[in-house]
Amino acid sequence: MGNLLLEALNVRVVGTGDKILVLAHGFGTDQSAWQRIWPYFQQNYRVILYDLVCAGSVNPDYFDFRRYTSLDAYVDDLVNILDALGVDRCSFVGHSVSAMIGILASIRRPQLFSKLILIGASPRFLNDKDYHGGFEHGEIEKLFSAMEANYEAWVNGFAPLAVGADVPDAIREFSRTLFNMRPDITLFVSRTVFNSDLRGVLGLVKVPCCIIQTTKDHSVPASVAEYLRSHLGGRTTVETLRTEGHLPHLSAPHVLAHVLWRALSR
């Protein structure tokens, strides 16, 4: 099971350090999103990279529509990867949906994680009474309809919005990995992510957390970072990156890398 999973999800371990650092990508990307980040850490860490099962770089036959109906199945994959590699303690960096996967994994196996660093994290994307997630239900349904109607047009509109910053290379890279995904898998995962609500479990997290938020993120309002800070059960800090967009590892890798160093050294 372990070796099959490592192969299926393209698990790589790079670097020569003594400590373990996991870099987990978010929706619409794959592990290549970290290509300008992991070299900063390779001398001090062994860096674990892997692809979510929904990524376009993974054989779509591995995506089980019956199994991946909630984030729990993605948590299973993460924990099983760490067990297969014999990891007993690591620092975890998760972007977007992988930030929430890391949160759930830390509740299930707190001893595995010394620190969680959460980039563009959101426990719930939909607005609710006394909670501003950033999206109304109707907006989400329009997004799903647009994906179904014309996937190419949706990617061409969504990628610049998500990247936020005027960085053409980052927009091209995000578009590339979105186009690599099979459209029906993209839609299915989008529904899973946008309909998730993890607010009720945040207090169960006891691992120290650092939330990294850009100055303007189309997908995650700044108020969500403050919500996380006040509701996560462990010691939690918030770092604001002086850049815009939901994908700072693509649009501003040097800026993000320096903040990651600072967060890891605390």
Image: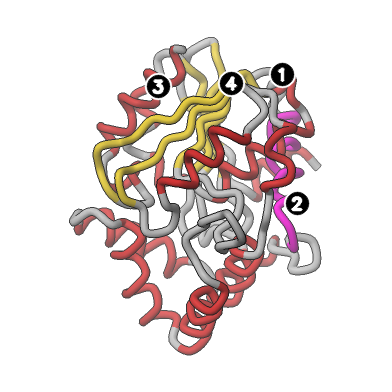
Which residue position is annotated with label 2? 73
Residue 118: image x %, image y %?
51, 36
Which label is found at residue 41? 3
Mark 1 or mark 2, earlier in chain: 2
Q: Is residue 153 above or below residue 175?
A: below
Q: What stretch is highlighted in magenta?
A: 69-84
Closest to the observer, 144 or 59:
144
Q: Which of marks 4 and 3 is in front?
A: 4
The crowd level at tag 4 (other Cα within 10 Å; few <14, some 14-19, many 20+) is some
Residue 146 in view here: yes
Residue 10: image x %, image y %?
58, 45
Q: Which of marks 2 and 3 is in front?
A: 2
Which residue position is annotated with label 4? 235
Which label is found at residue 88? 1
Q: Is residue 170 above or below residue 6?
A: below
Residue 201: image x %, image y %?
73, 41
Mark 2 or mark 3, earlier in chain: 3
| Type of the residue with mark 1 | Asp
Figure quadrant of the N terminus: top right
What's the residue at 56%, 54% (across, down)? 131
* Magenta-drawn stretch, dominant element (helix, strand or loop): helix
Contact flag, marks 2 and 3 (Cβ < 8 Å): no
Closest to the observer, 216 or 110:
216
Mark 2 or mark 4, earlier in chain: 2
Within the image, what quadrant is residue 69 found in? bottom right
Within the magenta stretch, is there residue 77?
A: yes
Mark 4 or mark 3, earlier in chain: 3
Within the magenta stretch, is there residue 200?
A: no
